[in-house]
Image (spheres, grey):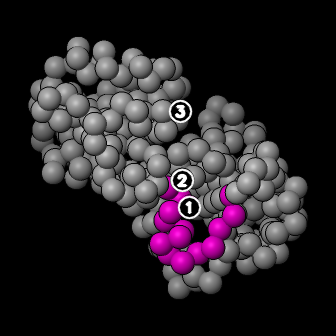
Amino acid sequence: MKKFGLLGFPLSHSFSKKYFTEKFVKLGIADTHQYDLYEIEHIDELKEIINKTEGITGFNVTIPHKLNVLPHLSDIEPNAQRIGAVNVLKVQENKTLKGYNSDYYGFSKSLAEFLGDTRKLKALVLGNGGAAKAVCVSLEDMGIPYQLVSRRASDDTINYRKANELLAEYKLIVNCTPLGTYPNVSTFPDLDYENIGSGHFCFDLVYNPSETKFLQKSKENGAKTINGYDMLVYQAEKSWEIWNS
């Protein structure tokens, strides 16, 4: 039995288990392939999972482990090294781990479809975690200037008060925070939504619910919106490709 799984905490809203379980059925390999959830609060628990789980082949990685898994890797793919975050692990023959980043691929593909020919934009990237790191590298490669936004300003990050002053100039807004994720569906980024309009493109990496408060409030003012579902499908397929390479 080949086994795969998702590492994160919490995992109450997992997309991956349902997606891969259905994929295994469609491929006719459900009797030899299994996908489980590994809800671990501390990444140090990963070593025990690998040692005790016969047939473990690979993992997807989500909040909060995309960064703190890095010291546990024996190898890292160059693009993931550049990004500085990992969301796919391949268990090698000696039970060591190689890290990859499929968020980059999933976001790039989904964003290109969302924007179409509209590329002369500047982006506000909300959040500074592992997903935001992949988004920033993707935007850089697409030639889209960006500004990181967080609750607290730092050397390379502005706060929301400053971000609100830039809404007329920055027309692409990417939410990489968990705000609005089920079950906390009433939360949303602290933006001046009355200054978001028909010229804005709002991308939320959250997929559950399908329309977060961030997307709803932006859409009401005329913005074009997309959630993170397509990105998740693309990155999941990239994960499958990595595990089978």
Q: Which residue matches tag 2?
A: 133
Task: Describe the element under mark 1 as helix, strand or loop.
Answer: helix
Q: Which amino acid does label 3 sit on?
A: Pro
Q: Which residue matches tag 1?
A: 136
Q: In this view, does 183 lie to the left or right of 157?
A: left
* Numbered label attached to residue 64: 3
Give the CA separation, mark 3 to mark 1. Answer: 18 Å
Q: Position of residue 244 (x, y in %)?
A: 16, 47
Q: What residue type is labelled 1?
A: Cys
Name the N-terminal-most of marks 3 and 2: 3
Q: Between 240 and 64, which is closer to the camera in this rendering?
A: 64
Q: Between 237 and 136, which is closer to the camera in this rendering?
A: 136
Q: Residue at x 59, y 75 (%)?
A: 144
Q: Between 33 and 153, which is closer to the camera in this rendering?
A: 153
Task: Describe the element under mark 3 as helix, strand or loop.
Answer: loop
| Label 2 close to label 1 by CB (< 8 Å) | yes
Residue 32 visible within the image: yes
